[in-house]
Image (cartoon, rainbow, N blue to C red):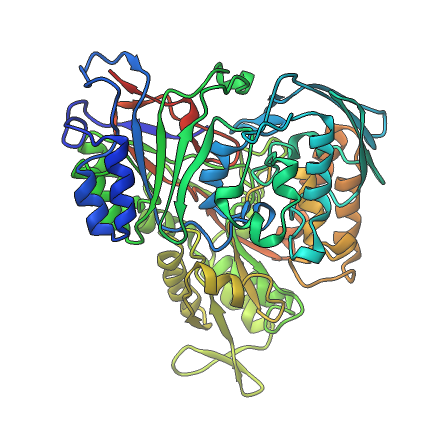
Amino acid sequence: MPSTTTGTPGAPGTTGPRPTRRAVSAALGAGAVGTFLTACGGGASGSENASGSGAAQRGGDVVVLIDSLGDTWIPNNSAISSFQGNVWGHVTDKLVYVDGDGQVTPWLAESWEQNQDATEFTLHLRSGVTFSDGTALDAAAVVANLDYWAKGQADRGVNPIGLFPKTYLAASAADASTVVVEFSAPTLGFIPTLGYHGSILTSPKTIALPAEGQADLSQFSGSGPFTVESWKEGDNVVLARRDDYAWGPQALGKSDAAALDTITYKIVKESSLRTASLRSNQADVVFNATPQELSGLQDAGFTVATPRYLGFAHGYRLNTSVAPFDDVLVRQAFQHAVDRDEILSTVYTGDWKKAESFIQSNVPEASDHSAEFAFDADLAAQLLDRAGWVAGADGERSKGGQPLAVTLFPNPYLVTSQAIDELVAQQLGKVGFTVDLQTFDVVTYGQRVSNNKSLSNYEVTRSFIDVGTVASILTSADEGEDWFGAGERDQTLNQLRDAVAGAVDPDTRATSVDQLQQYVLEQALFVPLEQIVQRIYAHRSDLEGVTYNGVAYANLYTAHLAG
């Protein structure tokens, strides 16, 4: 569950006049950050002046400062982005809701059944749901979405969703409110994956658009509690409440229209400027504050949330097909050279936890294998000695005239990544590695680092909803992502992958997941760092009722201003 702390009520930044919705929109039109903040003069604007009574009120315009909004609005190509997911979560719905503990509850799928071997599922849909363009969200629309998620549109350059089950065969509408979904093999994780942040329900009219139309956010239609009022590429997105919305998820205890009038996402790249704007009453929510800023924000009266998502722990996946990590001894040396306590005490606050495996501990099937990768610099040095890497007078190791060189690529989706990689570089240097850092922005990182099979390592910040999807990305089977460059060479890894993917009951799968974690960490295929908090939020204390789902996005549908 998210860690949420509220500062002292009435502290700076929690009271004062708010701009009207028209003022916010006018300021956005100016484009410049300074003009925007000055023109706004503040954040949330209630339909009535705040009285400080703490009672919920309807209305208000909330400004969220965010460091990026990604590089495309084609739903399938953007939904994985940490940034755009904030927007998609307010203009779309999902078939099921998954909370921070991995619990699955009904949403637009009111109920479901599966056959004995988990190869066929039947979904029963809620009636009366519509997309904002007026199209019914019925069985035919769900079938169109399932095909879109599973297959993409190759002729238009639209990707399938990366973690959607690759065993998907077909979906059909049995009647207007019933969908039957078939798979080629047991797919126990299908229902939970419907709550993944990529599984957003999009109007068939939007799906039918050419690629340039799908990338035009003004043409997007979802069934969510907000619609896109306006947007400017690379600058802002303004969402407006949908007054006829009446189908929120049961788990949130709310089904009617949102209380807030609008949500404005405004790009402000510098964290210090975002938090300064929050402190000076010029914004209501900031995304990706640094951990070092959090205690000061709490002391100033703001609410801070550090939700952990369901997914992989933060760490490095090592490429076994690229030197020097083609040697298990070098991989193990890397694992044991990393001092995670130093990382936590230097970069983070008490809200962060040490990794126990390569998946987060809030994943129901996670188990503690931290002994496999415990910090031990002496052991790391011994492993490198055994591997034939000889330390020179300067402590740097070489073999056959080649240095023990590694390049780390800080992940721009994680605000703390560069600071961590700098520390890891120092720690690796103490046992003889020569380490270089190459830093890129989000777009360049996607072009030069993501899915680049020639790199020796890749820094992981990755969520998932159901552990059954993990197996499909570790190797190359069924067009898997082949995280460790092992292809089909590692028979033990393949067998464990197949056991996880093919399980038909949760207990059997949990046993196989435990064995998979043990093997991956014994072989040092993954080097865990900490349990990731990728999405950090801070907001005004009188913005109440914000909730966080299984992929740790803030949900302002449930939020209101205290009157």
Q: Residue at x 78, y 54 (%)?
A: 477
Quick check: 494 above or below 387? above
Residue 165 occupies quadrant: top right
Q: Give the camera-side residue of 431 and 478.
A: 478
Residue 470 occupies quadrant: top right
Quick check: 119 above or below 211? above
Residue 352 makes an appearance in the image: yes
Q: Residue at x 30, y 25 (%)?
A: 60
Question: Percent x, y for residue 559?
Answer: 37, 23
Q: Give the camera-side residue of 385 and 245.
A: 245
Asked if residue 456 lies left or right of residue 559, the reply is right
Quick check: 239 above or below 330? above
Most extreme residue toward the bottom, as rendered?
401
Question: Percent x, y for residue 489?
Answer: 78, 62
Question: Percent x, y for residue 391?
Answer: 47, 79
Question: Percent x, y for residue 430?
Answer: 40, 68
Residue 464 occupies quadrant: top right
Q: Give the camera-side residue of 533 and 269.
A: 269
Most extreme residue toward the front, as rendered?
134
Quick check: 67 above or below 256? below
Residue 296 makes an appearance in the image: no
Q: Residue at x 21, y 32 (%)?
A: 19
In the rendered image, which quarter contains the C terminus? top left
The count of marks equals: 0
Asked if residue 338 lies left or right of residue 78, the reply is left
